[in-house]
Amino acid sequence: MVETQEKGDARFCAQLLELVCDWSWEQNFELRFVVCGAPPFADANALIGRRLWDLPLVDVEPAQLEVLREALQAHRPFKDFVFGQRCPTGQLRYLSLSGLPAFDAQGVFLGYRGVGSDISGRKREEALLRLEHLVARLLAEADAALPAVKAVIQALCETEGWELGRFWELDAEAGVLRFGTAWNDPASSLAPHLPPPENVVFTPGTGMVGRVWQSGQPAWVSDLTQQQLVLPARLTPVLALHGACMFPVWAQGRIIGVLSFVSPRVREPDRRLLATFRMIGSQVGQFLQRQQAEAATRRARDVAEQATRMKSVFLANMSHEIRTPINGVMGLAHLLTRTALDARQGDFVTKIQHSSRHLLGLINDILDLSKIEAGQLEIEHVAFDLPQQLERAAELLQQRAAEKGLALSVAVDPGVPLELMGDPLRVSQILVNYGANAIKFTEAGRVEMRVDLLAQDDDGVTLRFAVADSGIGLSEEQIGRLFQSFQQADASTTRRFGGTGLGLAISKSLAEMMQGTVGVDSVPGQGSTFWFSARFARVSAHGETEAQTAAPDLSRLRGARILVVEDNDINQLVACELLRDAGLLPEVAEDGRVALARLAERPYDLVLMDMQMPVMDGVTATLSIRGERRFDTMPVIAMTANALSTDRDACLAAGMNDFVIKPFEPAALLDTLLRWIPAGPVGGAVWPA
């Protein structure tokens, strides 16, 4: 009865072991296997008489094995020692061993008893998860498409034991798959014997790659020698190709490529790996789609930047070609006003001046709009006197208002601070634009400029500027078309009053750049009020606003010798006459090379240098001048018809001291000369020894 009970207990223990492990084992006091159940990867008899560290262990670090050896030799328990073993088929299996030391009644060490488990499934899941994470990281960190795909192929080959992987990329226009990139094991002799992939194309349904493309499903062939789907029959045996796996690359519901892998070993289908490949195919597809979208964005940006550069060049050339003759027209008109004219002739000259200023205003509007669109227009932050700016704006409008018999007035709310920090030029620009429109569309009555305080805090104030008129007014539909480039209230407005509609669009952009908005309140037949708001900083206690300037004293410039470097005959005449009228002594050089020759002959107090000239331009000439020490202190002032900031920067970078923009007002030219011609004797400039 006792023996029967012991046998039952033994069977129960054996059944219990089967539930918690795959097999059991025993070692003798020499740590050699003496009893071994049937492990799932080999013949149990092959283990008898061998020690654990005598086995061909895979994926075991020497340090791990040394720790186990010490535990066994010290007769200590051990748990979950994991190692890999190759099956006779070549498949890698992972096992986990745990053991307890056995002693007799006297405490003599007898050996070990333990259990083993096949954990290949768990290790496989861990490996595939690591592979998925590796692929995700490679794609996330990649900058270029094909190098990233090659890195993914390498990761798949090295992790899963494939010798060669290739990516076949969709050529949508030709309707075929072409070679994209590849990776092969450096130790493999496989790749050199295969047909050059660059010469291979696949159509839907042709070859294994074409079949995967057509079906949209992964494909796995255990042994290519049995199924001639990829290579000619004559090549497969020579290359000893057996296993092959291929899967599609998806993006937005369509296949954009196929990844293919081959091996010289027979590879049985792995459902879990196929599931991973499906996911990786989607990841690669999304990555390639993102790369294509980013490439398209870069191309579009490059095209836009090129268009902007071409537009800037065009505007610079247009500015030069139009401003140069306008400078002549305005200059000659100014010179005519200094001669004896009868009333009729004086009226003609006045109309010439008004027309040329109108044309210049149109050019400035186009250039401002271009700079705003290119993000190159900057708002200044300088201290200025608000009443002075309002007065200047009113002066520019006064004559036109008087010609139509309109009353022009300016009103400032008492709470508005009079000294501000901002961009006075742009404030005046908007007010003059609003005022010019008000005068244009008002036949009788009044035009009023008004400034009110909207908000204030410790940092600054927000002001509302408005220009009200008693003109024709606007309907709601007409208001909706305002403040857009090249848009006016309606076509009849353009025919009757002229204009381009640029001024309001520019005003809107300028107001927004000054942290404000624009708007209009109007009733047809009763007039309109155009307004804008802007934010200004307060002037600090030590800030200085613009000072009222008296008429400049030109007496100290009399006799100064000026070299005018200009290729246009009319502009030569205008510049020289203006300078002579002010008591200066101008001489002309028609290009940069002639200017250098003149400077070699005699000293000058200042050089007025045109930018664009034949033979030698102004920048090149200035660089040559600054290359000689004797000209270090001689001022060079650019006369440029290019109003873009890049052109002005080029002047200063070449060594010029300042610039005047054509067409220039006589007063602006003379003010510049006063700034740069030093006080003291003039007309007798000498070179330093």
Image (cartoon, rainbow, N blue to C red):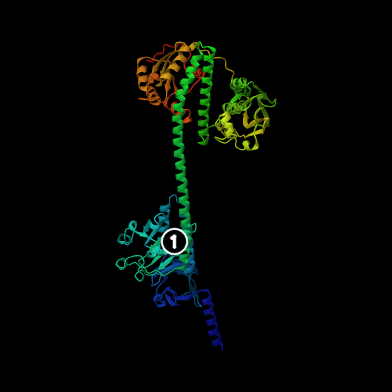
Q: Secondary structure at mark 1?
A: strand
**Is 69 above or below relative to 623?**
below
Q: Residue furthest right?
A: 414
- The residue sitting at 36% across, 67% down in the picture is 229
Whole-percent x, y for residue 171 in the image: 40, 55
Whole-percent x, y for residue 236 in the image: 32, 67
Whole-percent x, y for residue 180 in the image: 38, 55
Q: Nearer the viewer, residue 329 or 36?
A: 329
Q: Residue furthest bottom?
A: 1
Question: Does residue 658 appear left or right of residue 394 in this picture?
Answer: left
Residue 161 in view (yes/no): no
For the image shown, how many numbered marks are present on the structure?
1
**Is 175 above or below relative to 36?**
above
Question: Does residue 553 appear left or right of residue 388 in this picture?
Answer: left
Q: Residues within 10 Å of mark 1 (few under 14, many from 20)?
A: many
Q: Nearer the viewer, residue 134 or 504?
A: 504
Q: Which residue is mark 1?
A: 248
Whole-percent x, y for residue 564 in the image: 41, 18
